[in-house]
Amino acid sequence: MRINSVGENFKSDTEKLIAEKVLNALPKEYGRFTPDSRKILCLLAKTLKGKKGNIGIILVNDDYCVEDNLKYYKDFITAGARLGRANLFVYTLPTTPIAESAIYFGLTGPLFYLGGNEDLRFVLAQAKIMVKSREAKGMVVVVKKEKGFYAHFVA
C-alpha cells in the first residue's frame, strides 16, 4: 500500500507534475474543475505513476459536493436566475472528480463514492477484496480529510 497526499499547494503540485512529465497536459475541461477535482487529479497522478487499465477508485468524503453546489446556486441567483451559466457550471455528483480523473488516466476499474465518516480500515479491506476477487487489478482509495486528500493504492 502506498500513501500519497495533496493539500492546498496543489497548484504548485500541478506545475511540478507537468514538468516531471507525470501529467502530460491538463485535461481540456480543467478550467471547469473544482479545487477538489484539481487536487484529486494531482493526487492520482502521483499515486498511479503511469498505471492504466483495470484500476478502480473509491472516494471517501463526508461533504459530498454541497459546497460547490451552493457556490453555483449563489452565482446563478446573482445572474438573475434567468439563464444557466454553463461556463460556471460545477459538478453536481460526488463521483465526478474521480470520474474525470479516471477518464484522463485511462482507468477502467470500479468507481464509487462513500459518503459520511467511513472507517478507513473497512474501505481498505473492501478494496483488497475487490483486487483479490479480480474485479480490479488495483484500487486507489482517496480520502478527503479537512482541506487535503490522501490516496492509498491497493494491488
Image: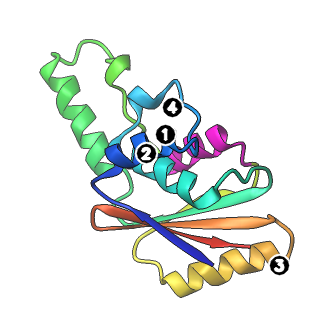
- 100 left or right, relative to 30: right
Residue farthest toward the top in the current orientation of the protein: 82
Task: Give the residue displayed 61% in from the left and 80% down from the top.
Answer: 124
Q: What's the CA distance linking mark 1 and mark 2?
A: 5 Å
Mark 2 → mark 3, Cα distance in angstroms: 34 Å
Residue 33: x and y in percent read 41, 35
Picture quarter with the C terminus? bottom right
- Between marks 3 and 1 in the image, the one whose residue lies nearer the viewer: 1
Label 2 secondary element: helix
146 or 18: nearer the eye?
18
Display colour scheme:
rainbow
Q: Under tag 3, what secondary structure?
A: helix
Circle 1 is placed at which residue position?
A: 19
- Amino acid type shown at disc 1: Ala
User: What is the spatial separation of the Cα atoms under label 3 and label 1, in whole angstroms?
Assistant: 35 Å
Q: Which residues are magenta?
A: 95-107
Front in this rendered view, residue 138 or 88 = 138
Mark in front: 2 vs 4: 2
| Residue drawn at the location 13% of the way across and 22% of the way down | 78
Residue marked by disc 4: 26
| Residue at the disc numbered 3 | 132
Q: Decide if residue 94 is in sight here.
A: no
Is residue 102 highlighted in magenta?
A: yes
Residue 95: x %, y % from top left: 53, 50
Alpha carbon of mark 2 to alpha carbon of mark 4: how far?
12 Å
Q: Residue at x 36, y 27 (%)?
A: 89
Residue name at image x 64 percent, y 55 percent: 49
The residue under label 2 is 16
Name the amino acid, label 4.
Answer: Leu
Q: In the picture, residue 92 is in which quadrant?
A: top left
- Residue type at mark 3 is Lys
